[in-house]
Image: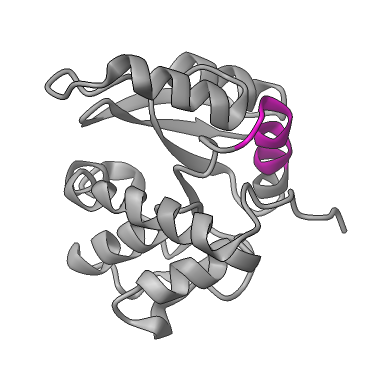
Amino acid sequence: MRRSPRPPVSDDETAAELVEEAGRLSYLLDGLLADPLWADAASCLVAGPGTPAVVGALDDAGRDGLVLSGLDGGAVRRAVEDALEDPARAPVTTGPADVAVLALALEHRTDAECTRLLEEIAGRTTRAVVIEQARPDDLGGGADELRVLAQARSGAALRDGQAIAALGAASGWSSEREIELGWGMVATVLSRD
């Protein structure tokens, strides 16, 4: 069995900050969860600091019956568990899933680490939704700061759908489409045969 990619952060304070920042996703996921890709999904692998927002949105959308699995460990896992409204909904297994959601799971990883994570989930699912900040929010300020922060965190610029598709292609994924979520966030849908 392959070793899971190292977590993007290892200390509790930073992990808690990342999970708190990712809370903004809770305002953006309704459209994604109305997408037909969820029609036959009975299980979902969730990873990244946005996991609490995804789990909350799934529950709000009436999909609380989905079997959840996760990849996060260490400080990120503890921060996710602390942020969930219902700790019983914490993803605890790493089994197969109908769809995987990487919720801001790449923004703190180098390209090589992203590729390893996409390889890791490839053994568990044939469809992945990668949610990332693709560009600065058109309505907000601080675009330059956001670009510099992205470069500092991962060694890469903000990753749009094309960048996610390229990372996915390196590990056998094909890009199906992009779903605009708002505030510069994009969900890139990847699939494997």
In the image, residue 166 lies at what x, y percent?
Answer: 60, 17
Say whether residue 115 is magenta. yes
> Across the whole image, how many numbered discs are drawn on residues?
0
Question: Which quadrant of the view contains residue 187?
Answer: top left
Magenta part of the protein: which range? 109-119
Res 44 seen here: yes
Question: Residue at image x 37%, y 24%?
Answer: 146
Asked if residue 122 lies left or right of residue 70, the reply is: right
Task: Please identify the quadrant where the C terminus is shown.
Answer: top right
Question: Which quadrant of the view contains residue 132?
Answer: top left
Task: Please identify the quadrant where the N terminus is shown.
Answer: bottom right
Say whether residue 58 is magenta. no
Tell me: residue 46, above or below residue 170. Answer: below
Res 98 seen here: no
Asked if residue 100 lies left or right of residue 6, the reply is: left
In the image, residue 105 lies at what x, y percent?
Answer: 52, 44
Question: Residue at image x 55%, y 65%?
Answer: 12
**Main SS, magenta residues:** helix
Residue farthest along the right direction in this orientation? 1
In the image, residue 26 lies at what x, y percent?
Answer: 23, 53
In the image, residue 163 lies at what x, y percent?
Answer: 53, 17
**Residue situated in front as seen by the camera: 8 or 166:** 8
**Residue situated in front as seen by the camera: 108 or 149:** 149
Asked if residue 166 lies left or right of residue 139, the reply is: right
Question: Residue at image x 29%, y 54%?
Answer: 23
Tell me: residue 9, above or below residue 91. Answer: above
Residue farthest along the left direction in this orientation? 139
Asked if residue 84 lies left or right of residue 108, the reply is: left
